[in-house]
Image (spheres, rainbow, N blue to C red):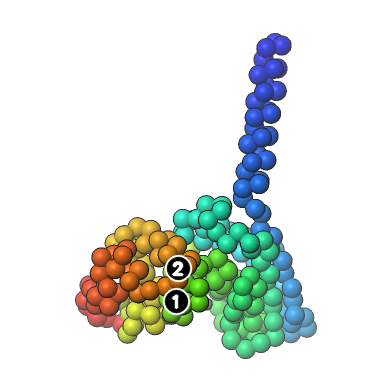
Amino acid sequence: MKKHSLAVVVLLVISSLMASTAITRAQAVTYEFFNNAIGTAGSTRFENGIGVSYSLDTLDTASTFIWQIFGQAAGDRKDDVQRVRLYVDDMDGVAYTINADIHVSAKYVGNYAGDVRREIGGVLYHEATHVWQWNGRGNAPGGLIEGIADFVRLKAGYAPSHWVGAGGGDRWDQGYDVTARFLDYLDGIKAGFVADLNRKMKDGYTENFFVELMGKSVNQLWSDYKSQFGGSN
Ligand SMILES: [Zn+2]
C-alpha cells in the first residue's frame, strides 16, 4: 500500500512537471472582441445571429487549424502575437486584418443573404490566416497572400458556393479562390507544399520557391494545372 502511494506521488510530480513545461512552451493566445458598431442592424445581427463567443471560439479553433496546416510547432510561429482582437466596425467591404487586429464589417453582416454564421466563420478563417502567415517580409505578391488565406478557408470546409472550381481563373496570382484552388492542386501533388512555401516566406520571397519545392517554374505549374482541368473556368 505504502509503495503504491509513493508511486502515485512520483507520477503526479512527473505529470505536473510535464504540464508546466507544456504551458511554458505553448504560449496561450487570448482572443478579444470589440463592437464599434453598436446600434446598427449588422451589429445586432452579429451579436444575435453569430454570437461573440462563437466568433472568438472560431478564431481560437482557426488558429490551431492554421498552425497545423502550416506544420508549425510552438516556437516556429509568430510567437510575439499573444492577443488577437476582433472588431465589428461600421464600414464598407467585408473584412481586413492589420497585424493581429481583425476588422469585420457590420454592414456586410447586416446585408448578407444566407447563413451568416457560416459565412463569417469562413471569413474568420481567412482573416486569422493573415494573422499567422508569413508574407516574405512584404515582398510576396498580394494574390499569393490572399490565395493562401483562401486555401486555409477551403481546407477548413468553408469554401462558398460562388467560388471558381478547380482549374478556374486566368493567372496563378489572381488571388483568393483562383489561387487557393491552384495551391490546393499543388498541395495534392506534394503534400505539405503550402506549409513549406509559407515557411520559406518568413525571410523573403522569390518565385524560385516554386522551382525549389516543385521542380518547375510557377508559370509551368500553372500551365500544367490549366491543361489538367481542360482550361475550364
Ligand atoms: Zn485577405
Residue 232 pos. (x, y %): 27, 81
Above/below status of 189 relative to 109: above
Q: Residue at x 74, y 84 (%)?
A: 40
Which residue type carries mark 1?
A: Ala
Residue 186 pos. (x, y %): 32, 66
Instruction: Answer with the quarter of the image where residue 98 lies.
Output: bottom right
Tags 1 and 2 in contact by the CB under 8 Å rule? yes
Res. 51 in view: no
Res. 35 in view: yes
Q: Residue at x 36, y 62 (%)?
A: 193
Residue 105 pos. (x, y %): 64, 82
| Quadrant in the picture for the C terminus | bottom left
Q: Residue at x 56, y 53 (%)?
A: 75
Assess disc 1: are there few (<14), some (14-19) or many (≥20) residues with their C-alpha within 10 Å of its C-alpha: some
Work out whether residue 111 or residue 188 is closer to the camera in this orientation and state it: 188
Work out whether residue 30 or residue 177 is closer to the camera in this orientation and state it: 30
Instruction: Answer with the quarter of the image where residue 118 lies.
Output: bottom right
Residue farthest toward the right in the current orientation of the protein: 39
Q: Residue at x 67, y 23 (%)?
A: 10
- Numbered mark located on residue 140 in the image: 1
Assess disc 2: are there few (<14), some (14-19) or many (≥20) residues with their C-alpha within 10 Å of its C-alpha: many
Q: Which residue is mark 2?
A: 201
Label 2: which secondary element: loop
